[in-house]
Image (cartoon, rainbow, N blue to C red):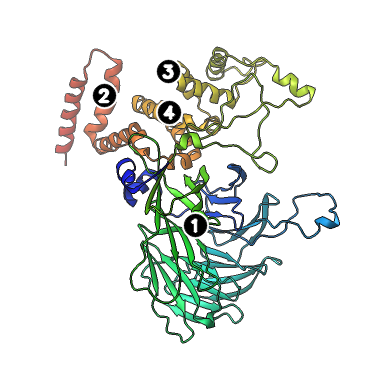
Amino acid sequence: AVLSVLSLQRACPLSSGSEMAADTGSSSLQLPCVFSPKSRQYLALCAQDGRLRIWNTDSKTLHQEYVPSAHLSATCICIAWGPCRTVKDGPQRKKRKSEAGQAAEKADLLAMGTAAGSVLIYSTAKGALHCTLDGGHSGGVNCVQWHPEDSLLYSASDDTNIIEWDLQTGKARSKWKADRAAVTSLCVSPDGKLLLSAGLIIKMWDLDTKEVYRKFTGHSTAVTTLRFATTRPPDSNGLYFLSGAAHDRLLSVWQVREDGKDKNSVVSFTLTDEPLHVDLVASNSKEEAVRLAVVCKDGQLHLFEHFLNGPCKKPLSPSCTVQMSDTKDSPVPIPLLAAALGAGMQTVLLSYGNHLQPVMEKVEINTAERHVCLTRDVQTSLSLSIETAVSKVKTPVVNAKGRVLVPGLPGHQAPVKGSLQGSEKRKKDTDTKEMSIAERLREIDLSTVSTDKGALKGTASLQTDNFAVLLVQGLESSDTNILNKVFQTRKEIVIKKTVARLPIPAVLPLVEEVSLFVNHCFCIPLKAVLMVRWLKAVLMHHTSYLASLPDLVTQLGVLYHMIESRVKMFHKLTKLHGKLYLLMTQVATSDSSNTVTDVDHTAKLVYEEGECVP
């Protein structure tokens, strides 16, 4: 539904950027999110877990997923699509003469700059890593940019250097110091002759000589966005580019003048927050306006259309501002992640939600309205379906009669279909009778109580999958008996594998149950240690999901309360009275003849006598 500005104020009171950040759980780290060029068929993004995910914008499905070998230690900082090219998707039939020259160009190569200083080149056609460019930078790579025609790639780093990479050889072709501080942004001109770089100041380089052509100053913080706004040559006074900086609510437009009098920006576009994603349709002549779609840190989209023809004194406001909210009675803002302009100003391809599972939608926006609010039910809009033909995510073969628990965000489903094909051996395996809950519990007792090695001979050992099924069953039914049986396992490897096999909706209930168990059995050291192992395993395996929750503090209230209470008790335990009180309390709970009050009084006497001794 498209609402007017009055409806926006009543039904969509979207808050400021700080509230939006609190709602999305986002940090100061900007997560890369980029549409593929031309057809916008793919959306590439890196989430909190360090994985590269490529989504198909047409089918709204996960196209490919790639996990870099060092995705946790060397996280991806920036990504950039290479120019579209003709690729071979495998063995193809011989084309007719009439079909010759009709090979479609597709987006294939994707460059990823990492915090370790290396650049990874991923191929969507192969669904695998194409090559790795390393050994060039000693600091994190902040930006990567492709040459529009040649097989060249430019990377900028914290080490203040720019490197020109040759993709055919996989080696550095040229390297030069670009600034006294970290180089944070790059942009190659449409004709491939000029390069913009930004550190403390913005510099324009001649790529043939690697010499500075012009310098521009005006930003007090790190420049995060650089885009050429026109395709005209620099000696015509018609070359413009725009820049945006961190914590800056303006996009500045600079004119490259022939006489060199281009020290100040000529146009400014006003925003509501720092720009995160900018899509631009460049102007080819003075009679053609430049079109902008800017997604800000507060999750709003601003659309601009302006004819670049000299300076403009007043900052320009957006022609249309787009916001999103859910359909609840008290609307909650939905952050926009990226936007791509279509053929007309009113057609925009949007990506919204979260980086783990974004929603992609092509919408028609009434730009006659200054403020537009789109309401969406994200829970029903999301669907995680995977293209099995090219995806690296494998689908297991399961019994059609069995109930399958699959990972996914709450409210989302990823059905796994049972395969009708397979050998006779596989059919025999699927026909085997499954263990009941009672049999699984009985086997846990056997595996934990029995000390005779031969006692379990001839009995099938309980697998980690059974522990996961039992744990989910106990969490869903709140059965303390089942939970106690599962939590008593002492093998750390079993605990880790069980937590790793849990479906995502069971993570929060598990954390709450573990917190309660730790709280209740804190005075029993062995049980407390076991429960802490469970809690540690959850935080290690499901950190990315927990970090994406908007109300994490509220949902983990029990855990926070327990930690706070234990921290307060720590000061008491450092004193003799506190230690005695904890020790004697455990004795008093097992001996009904003594009360806690008597024990406390005795402990205080000992404590006071101990303090009098010099």
Distance in Å between CA atoms under marks 2 and 3: 28 Å
Q: Is 553 situated above or below 182?
A: above
Q: Is 237 situated above or below 110?
A: below
Amino acid identity at mark 2? Met
User: So how many labels did they put on this image?
Assistant: 4
**Nearer-the-camera pick, 81 or 142:** 81
Looking at marks 1 and 3 on the same chain, the residue that comes earlier in the sequence is marked by: 1
Looking at marks 4 and 2 on the same chain, the residue that comes earlier in the sequence is marked by: 4
Residue at (38, 38) in percent of width and height = 552
Looking at marks 4 and 3 on the same chain, the residue that comes earlier in the sequence is marked by: 3
Q: Residue 235 in the image: x percent, y percent?
A: 53, 83
Provide the secondary structure element on which disc 2 rests: helix
Give the crowd class for mark 1: few <14, some 14-19, many >=20 residues within 10 Å. Answer: some
Q: Residue 322 in the image: x percent, y percent?
A: 41, 51
Looking at marks 4 and 1 on the same chain, the residue that comes earlier in the sequence is marked by: 1
Amino acid identity at mark 3? Thr
Give the farthest residue toward the bottom: 259
> Which residue matches tag 1?
345
Provide the secondary structure element on which disc 3 rests: helix
Q: Residue 8 in the image: x percent, y percent?
A: 34, 45
Looking at marks 2 and 1 on the same chain, the residue that comes earlier in the sequence is marked by: 1
Q: Given this view, does label 1 or label 3 mark the residue nearer the observer?
A: 1
Q: Is 138 situated above or below 110?
A: below
> Which residue matches tag 4?
509
Amino acid identity at mark 4? Pro
Horizontal side, residue 72 vs residue 431: left or right = left
> Which residue matches tag 3?
480
Residue 584: image tag: 2
Q: Residue 340 in the image: x percent, y percent?
A: 52, 55
Give the crowd class for mark 4: few <14, some 14-19, many >=20 residues within 10 Å. Answer: some
